[in-house]
């Protein structure tokens, strides 16, 4: 204790301890651990001091700054900073002085640099979070739907949002840039064997294509492509709209059976087959769209997949079928009403009449098979026009707006004669 007390009085009051002897390591852990030490400043040597004020004890490094001005650099409170640590910090300060620097300025600069580093780290994390939100699958999917829905029929956007909500929740927060075939397949696995599965896969593929061409993600092989997915999930018999189709040679017998079987669904399915139309277009068909005298059905662009009005020539068999319907013929009434008043029949109604594994949409494929069979005088181009598919590029379509109605009527009449020879 005497050594500590004498240290407190030697040189500290003379030029702030700068002229004191260079003796070092005067303090000891044993002395520091005493419960009672008088107020004052106790030198360890080489500028390191312990300042005692009441119950508080703290380390300070005292040195001569520029122009000999006294400077005090706090090194921390005791006992949080022990004697060995305090000596280490003082030694680091002395090394800075030895190179011509100022320990306090160096410390402040280090704090400023550390604070700047924290700011930059926070900014980088914010950018990463913003990028993660920008590229999150759910956000990109919604962006894709909004960008495309003006060109879709009214229910497509609702269906696609349902896919995200009901089947793709595990992908919602994952960046499109980080999605893998395996993660996509894990989301698809529960629905892969249902009719919805392939459509959801195709939707995911389109979203990722959109993300790449929009610059949201770098270009790469699409992990949702069917060639990749089928290596993880078993291959499907059909994909997208490639529905299993009844061989065209078997369709006449099926059409004849439909015509002879009573029911409210049978006429609708037979009409869809006679006109090679999509089932939704038939189920939502209204009398306003039909001109029986002109043997013409005009599907408005608001209901049609390609978003253009589509004229469908009606064969005699199709016209006779419509004339046989004696229900409400108000302009906005449904031609093929469902069980619920004013509501179309269920989208699954046709499936109840079609033998497995065939699908309602597959009859369009059957029609093309018949039209392009060996020896046929019809062309695939005309068959595609009958299906309502867009032919050529946007530029060629701008110059060629003829929908070939007479030629298509000839083909549809021949198709009806093939299906129902006695009609």
Image (cartoon, rainbow, N blue to C red):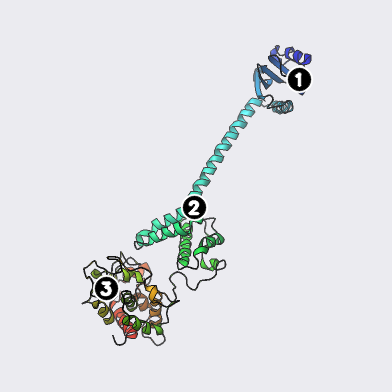
Q: CA distance from mark 1 to mark 2?
A: 62 Å
- Decide if residue 374 is on the left or right side of residue 398: right
> Disc 1 or disc 2, which is closer to the eye?
1
Displayed quadrant of residue 308: bottom left
The answer, for residue 102, to whether it is visible in the render is: no
For residue 377, which quarter of the picture? bottom left
Image position of 416 with respect to 54: above or below? below
Residue on which the image places disc 2: 136
Position in image of residue 157 (x %, y %) = 38, 59
Q: According to the image, label 3 marks what residue? A: 297
Q: Is residue 296 visible?
A: yes
Give the CA separation, mark 3 to mark 2.
Answer: 44 Å
Q: Element type at marker 2? A: loop
- Measure how far apart labels 1 and 3 are at the Cα level: 106 Å
Residue 408, horizontal then vertical, whole percent: 31, 79
- Relative image position of residue 30 (x, y in whole percent): 77, 22
Q: Which residue is mark 1?
A: 31
The secondary element bearing badge 3 is classed as strand
Query: Which corner quadrant holds the C terminus?
Result: bottom left
């Amino acid at each position: 204790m005497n050594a500590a007390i004498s240290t407190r009085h030697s040189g500290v009051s003379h030029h702030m301890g700068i002229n004191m002897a260079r003796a070092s390591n005067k303090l000891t852990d044993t002395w520091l651990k005493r419960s009672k030490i008088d107020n004052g400043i106790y030198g360890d040597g080489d500028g390191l001091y312990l300042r005692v004020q009441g119950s508080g004890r703290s380390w300070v490094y005292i040195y001569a700054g520029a122009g000999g001005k006294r400077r005090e650099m706090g090194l921390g409170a005791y006992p949080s900073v022990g004697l060995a640590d305090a000596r280490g910090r003082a030694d680091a300060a002395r090394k800075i002085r030895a190179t011509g620097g100022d320990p306090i300025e160096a410390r402040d600069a280090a704090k400023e640099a550390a604070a700047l580093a924290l700011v930059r780290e926070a900014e980088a994390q914010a950018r990463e979070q913003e990028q993660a939100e920008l590229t999150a699958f759910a956000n990109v999917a919604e962006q894709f739907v909004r960008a495309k829905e003006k060109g879709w029929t009214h229910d497509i956007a609702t269906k696609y949002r349902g896919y995200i909500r009901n089947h793709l929740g595990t992908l919602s927060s994952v960046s499109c840039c980080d999605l893998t075939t395996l993660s996509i397949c894990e989301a698809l696995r529960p629905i892969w064997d249902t009719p919805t599965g392939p459509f959801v896969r195709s939707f995911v593929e389109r979203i990722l294509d959109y993300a790449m061409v929009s610059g949201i993600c770098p270009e790469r092989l699409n992990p949702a492509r069917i060639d990749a997915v089928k290596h993880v999930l078993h291959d499907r018999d059909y994909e997208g709209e490639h529905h299993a189709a009844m061989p065209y040679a078997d369709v006449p017998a099926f059409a004849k059976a439909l015509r002879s079987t009573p029911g409210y669904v049978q006429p609708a399915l037979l009409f869809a087959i006679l006109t090679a139309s999509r089932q939704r277009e038939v189920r939502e068909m209204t009398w306003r769209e039909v001109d029986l005298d002109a043997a013409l059905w005009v599907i408005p662009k608001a209901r049609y997949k390609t978003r253009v009005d589509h004229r469908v020539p009606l064969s005699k068999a199709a016209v006779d079928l419509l004339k046989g319907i004696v229900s409400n013929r108000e302009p906005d009434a449904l031609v093929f009403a469902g069980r619920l008043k004013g509501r179309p029949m269920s989208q699954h109604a046709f499936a109840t009449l079609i033998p497995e594994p065939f699908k309602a949409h597959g009859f369009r494929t059957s029609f093309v098979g018949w039209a392009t069979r060996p020896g046929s005088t019809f062309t695939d181009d005309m068959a595609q026009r009958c299906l309502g598919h867009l032919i050529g590029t946007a530029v060629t379509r701008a110059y060629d707006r003829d929908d070939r109605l007479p030629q298509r009527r000839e083909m549809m009449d021949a198709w009806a004669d093939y299906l129902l020879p006695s009609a």
